[in-house]
Amino acid sequence: MSTYVYGITAASHPSLPEGMGGVSELPVRILKEGELAAVVSDAPEGLRPKRKELLAHQNVLAEAGGGGCVLPMRFGSVAPDDGTVTGVLGERAEHYLERLRTLDGKVEYNVKATHDEQAVLHRVMSESPELRSLAEANRKAGGGTYEDRLRLGEMVASAVKAREADDAVDVQHTLEPAAAAVSVGPESTGWLANVSFLVERDTAENFLAAVEQLRKGHPHLELKVNGPLPPYSFVEPGPAEPAGTTAGADTAEE
């Protein structure tokens, strides 16, 4: 039977509660290899990222994380068998031990940013005398010709796109000093910025304060902050996690 992997930790990590269930309520167990251990269960067939299963995955990580640092695998990480998991632990022991040292005491905050449509239009108009002049000329001409309206629309769209690029840089550069590391997420048409920040658990309030300052200084931005999370974005693919093949930890099917 294939093996579902929740995370990787040190072999000396405290044991989990006896009989603890994971995805599909299957019993969670520990596989050890040298100085490392993997938190696993059997892998159910037809596993889907439904809310109940995502919560089960996260609960196992939360329980394991209470006893020390755990390198979290994303939901849906499945290896062919136990031997594959222990084999990779042995092969990549140096890397995983380094990651455990580096990520100890740290959590992840994911920040996604998008524009408030009306606010950003107001901002780009206020920043461009040319746009204001053209808009005023069109107004005085009763709306202007089709070509004039088209030109204004294209110029506004270009200005908004440029503002998106500038704001994406601002989001990262403003919050980066409050974090130990940064991981830029994949581009999406839904967000102008999608960035994860590795933050010391004990100083997370400083990072959240920086987010609030960013909000105040950029009222045309809408920010979505998700965290604290296990540091998913700061663990390279593990024994059951080929890059790009797993479901996001915050995406659920109903």
Image (cartoon, rainbow, N blue to C red):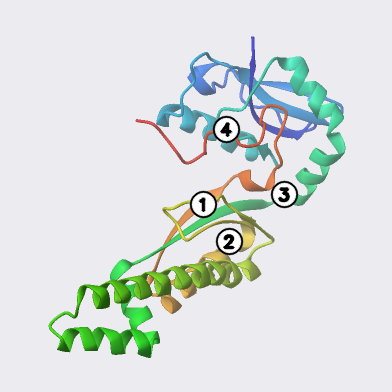
Label 1 Cα crowd, 10 Å radius (few <14 / some 14-19 / many 20+): some
Foreground mark, 3 or 4, reads: 4
Mark 2, secondary structure of its residue: helix
Q: CA distance from mark 3 to mark 1?
A: 15 Å
Mark 2 / mark 4, whichever is N-terminal: 2
Label 3 Cα crowd, 10 Å radius (few <14 / some 14-19 / many 20+): many
Mark 3 / mark 4, whichever is N-terminal: 3
| x 30%, y 90%: residue | 133
Mark 3 / mark 1, whichever is N-terminal: 3
| x 82%, y 40%: residue | 95
Mark 1, secondary structure of its residue: strand
**Extreme-left residue of the structure:** 142
| x 47%, y 27%: residue | 53
The three-letter code of the residue at mark 2 reads Ala
Q: CA distance from mark 3 to mark 4?
A: 21 Å
The residue where tag 3 is placed is 103
